[in-house]
Image (cartoon, rainbow, N blue to C red):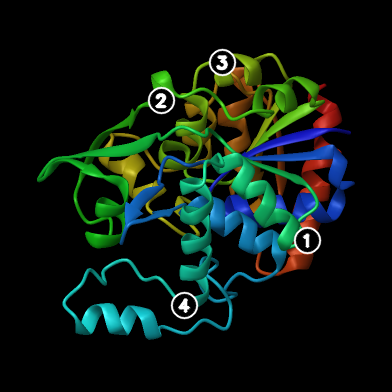
Amino acid sequence: MKIAVLCGGVGGAKLADGLSRALPPENLTIIVNTGDDFEHLGLLICPDLDTVCYTLAGIANPETGWGRADESWNALAAIDSLGGPSWFRLGDRDLGTHLERTRCLAQGQTLSQVTSGFCRSWNILPNVIPMSDRAVRTMVSTEAYGELTFQDYFVRRRCEPKVTGFRFSGAEHALPAPGTLEAIEAADAVILSPSNPWVSLDPILALPGIRSAVGRKPVAAVSSIIGGKTVKGPAAKMFQELGFEPSAPAIALHYRDILDGFILDQVDLALGGDIRPLGIQVAAFQTLMNSPADRRRLAEDVLNFIPSIL
């Protein structure tokens, strides 16, 4: 079975890792959000792309899920001592990634080419593709501050401002990265990972041709909300502020135009009755991924569920 998975953030990275353990590498393509990319200290930072790659390579920080394991903070401390911007925490090992990426881009490589090279260096076997080689920037509309860049909202202001909407600057002119549409077309099914729907998956789906290509395939989504809460990140808060009850059915409704199957956590089993009338197949599994074994188990559960929507 060939799978294309759309993902971003820690939850998406963990499921992508589980799928990489359950599928032959040639049968898995991982399409990663780049809407939260930004320029910092003269470097291109790709938080979701790096989280996915570090996780697949087995070098992610096991406590946070993002950043590198066995990290040190000497460069950040030096920047701070000089009065520079230290609000975005870049560890020394992580900084090496951004330095080399920016150097390669300056030499004329595309982001997808750089990512492919990094994956070879880290022995990542599945195909990992940034959603676009062109800049797309997630902009967060807030009640108190107007429009903020995503990292300003997410890191500098710690998700505190009340959200009123989102805009994906540049998406209308940003072509999907080479191989993206082809991977979706070749897939037997598309999986929407347990990522924030507003800021991790919607930027990918906003690119020209992506949503229609996904909609032509059997699509299964894994809920990023368990028992009305998110494991990480502000998705539940965003749903509330936009006037929706944060719940697994809210996630299903968000994707209802392209969704054929939906996986919710066992604690939300009773909520399946709110989703099935939408014409969506529902299954309940243990979706919390606390270990690599959990990741593989959930991936296998999702893969075993997919034949029911083909």
Sequence-earlier tag: 4 or 2: 4
Q: Position of residue 226 (x, y in %)?
A: 54, 52
Residue with the mark numbered 2: 171
From the viewer's side, name the closer residue of 296 and 156.
156
Mark sitting earlier along the chain (3/2): 2
Q: Measure the alpha-carbon separation of dots 1 and 3.
A: 30 Å
Residue 296 is left or right of residue 51, and the answer is right
Q: Are marks 4 and 2 in contact (CB under 8 Å)?
A: no
Residue extending farthest to the front is 107
Q: Is the residue marked by circle 2 packed among few (<14), some (14-19), or many (20+) residues within 10 Å?
A: many
Question: For residue 289, which quarter of the picture?
Answer: bottom right
Q: Which residue sits at x=55%, y=21%?
A: 256
Q: Nearer the viewer, residue 245 or 296?
A: 296
- Decide which of 260, 271 is in the foreground and name it: 260
Tell me which amino acid carries mark 4: Asp
Question: Of tags 4 and 2, which is closer to the observer?
Answer: 4
- Would you call the spot at circle 3 few (<14 residues within 10 Å), some (14-19), or many (20 or more)? few
Residue beneath disc 1: 123
Side (left or right) of 306 relative to 97: right
Quadrant into which the N terminus falls: top right
Of 43 and 17, nearer the camera is 43
Horizontal placement of 79 versus 26: left or right? left
Q: CA distance from mark 3 to mark 2?
A: 11 Å
Question: The residue under label 3 is which amino acid type?
Answer: Gly
In this view, 235 is above or below 31: below
Farthest left residue?
144
Measure the alpha-carbon separation of dots 4 and 2. 32 Å
Residue at which label 3 appears: 209
Left or right, residue 111 beside residue 24: left
Residue beneath the point at 54% across and 47% down: 8
